[in-house]
Amino acid sequence: MNMTVMLLVILVAVSAGAMAYVFLFPQIEVEKKTASRVSRVKAAETDKDKIKVARDRVQELSKRRKSVQDNLKDLEKKQNEKNKDRKDKSVRARLIQAGLTMSVKKFYVLGGGLGLAVFLVALMYGAPLLLALGGGIVGALGLPRWVLGFLVKRRQNKFLEEFPNALDVMYRSIKSGLPLNDSVRLIASDGQEPVKSEFQRVVEAQQVGMSIPEGINRMMLTMPLPEVNFFGTVITIQAQAGGNLSEALANLSKVLRERRKMKAKVAALSMEAKASAVIIGALPFIVATLVYLTSPDYIMVLFTDPRGHLILGASAIWMSIGIVVMRQMINFDI
């Protein structure tokens, strides 16, 4: 009897639980869905806030980047305009760029003496008067300027070899706590030529009242190189907008070294073409010299007959065109 009552109680309890689950299950599901929907809405609102913050941050960074780019473009434009105004091709400027203390008057006197010497030597060896006169003009005007250009190029190459090392010294000195003025004076006193002389001019410009950026920008007058322009741009930007100057100088030094490596690689790859161009350009003169040494009467017709003069003039024009074309083909700007 007790067992029957117990089973009946259990059956009634199970039935009641089943009925409660049947009637309460939809409400429970609705509450779960509601809670899940509310949590998703809250998460979406949180995500929207995060997305909005991230979007605002990206917009602010893009605006700042655009502002920096605009400032750099304006600064580069002004720098290029200044550099165009500062490009001086006069003999006096070239003498300064070559590191020579010679005056312009002395340069022209030496050129005139060289031209006169070439003219007299040509007459002594029996050359026609017009040919001797042309050689004298070339010796007086062309050869001295070519030598001056060679000296300027050699000094610029020495400057480019030492300039990254000077930037490394400035980077370490500024990173160790020295100001920019002292680091510039350090290069001016302990640097290697010709970097030492150029930085000495910057120190002298500072002593007469110019700022460091102005003095460095004036370096383009005596060393008109893109690398110097980069250096002046970095210093000018740091003076106007601030920033980590030591890191900027380290990056600039790395860029200049990579730029020089690229120039050396291009020069090595184009050396075969340059050698071929030199051989082709020199071959007519070599052949003419050998023919003159073996059969002078055979080739002297070109110098004594008017038709030979015409042939020589036309050949000179075509040779000049060929040399210019080959020069443009083998020269690369980096």
Image (cartoon, rainbow, N blue to C red):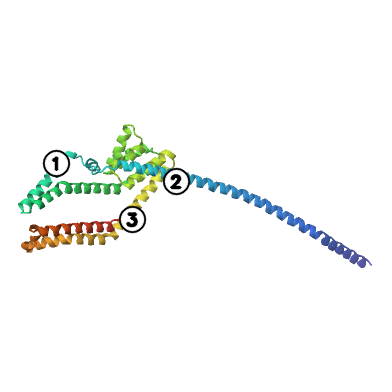
In which image quadrant can residue 111 be found?
Answer: top left
What's the amino acid at mark 2? Gln
Percent of width and height locating residue 184: 34, 39
Q: Measuring from the top left, give residue 207's x and y in whole percent.
A: 32, 32
Q: Name the secondary structure under disc 3.
A: helix
Q: Amino acid at mark 3?
A: Met
The one of 45 and 75 positioned closer to us in this rendering: 75
Question: Do the CB atoms of the residues marked 3 and 1 lie less than 8 Å apart?
Answer: no
Q: Nearer the viewer, residue 222 or 257?
A: 222
The one nearer the camera, 193 or 35, is 35
Q: Residue at x 33, y 34 (%)?
A: 206
Q: Amino acid at mark 1?
A: Val
Which residue occupies 41% across, 41% down?
Answer: 237
List the residue tagged with mark 2.
69
Marked residue nearer the N-terminal end (3 or 1): 1
Where residue 91 appears, x then y in whole percent? Answer: 22, 42
